[in-house]
Amino acid sequence: MIIELASVGVLPKALKESFTPDDVELDGEGELVSVATLDADVFSKDEKVYIRGRIGTIIRLECTRCLENVTTPADLDFEAIFVDASKEDSESEVEVKDAALDESLVLDGRIDLREVVREQLLLSLPEQVYCSDDCKGLCPKCGTNRNLLDCKCDEGDIDPRWAALKNLR
Ligand SMILES: [Zn+2]
Ligand SMILES: [Zn+2]
């Protein structure tokens, strides 16, 4: 669904939308396994457009340690602020740059709600996620998932290629 900036009024208008996993691509950071619902208000204030509300879905991520799938609910409150680029004169442009990183400049007068949902979900993804608190991860030597199998490797003798990987974690 597209919102025309020009059509947004001062009085909040309710938005209720749902998006399929295909609508919301998370750039390989994760994958939606259910529809995403958006329940928000849109309104304008001081020449800016605000979308404020809640997004809910279920996301599949990879465990940081063992790379197995982890399914986690996402339920987040958000506020997104949009500034119409065509209305910016040179004076206030400086202000916008100073103003806030959480404001998006809209070039064509339209906000794509799909993009809003995608961006908010990407921002909400955790840096690290674990399939369980005591995930044993992958063996640094042979790469076996040690939650599933005890590979009996001697960790004192680590293949340098895996050791490099281990240092990255
Ligand atoms: Zn794990
Ligand atoms: Zn091993």
Image: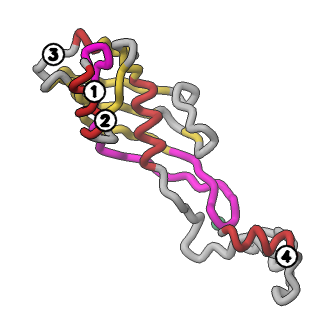
Examine the structure image and report whether residue 73 is included in the region drawn in magenta. Answer: yes
- The answer to whether mark 1 and mark 2 are in CB contact below 8 A is yes
Residue that label 1 marks: 93
Q: Residue at x 27, y 38 (%)?
A: 79
Residue that label 3 marks: 9
- The answer to whether mark 1 and mark 3 are in CB contact below 8 A is no
Find residue 121 and report its horizontal and vertical position in percent: 44, 41
Whichever of callouts 1 and 3 sits on the residue coming sooner in the sequence is 3
Beta carbon at label 4 within 8 Å of ligand 2: yes
Residue type for callout 2: Lys
Whichever of callouts 1 and 4 sits on the residue coming sooner in the sequence is 1
Quadrant the N terminus occupies: top left
Residue type for callout 3: Gly
Whichever of callouts 3 and 4 sits on the residue coming sooner in the sequence is 3
In the image, taking residue 66 as reference, residue 36 lies left or right, namely left
The crowding category of the residue bearing disc 4, from other C-alpha atoms within 10 Å (few below 14, some 14 to 19, many at least 20), is: some
Find residue 106 and report its horizontal and vertical position in percent: 36, 21
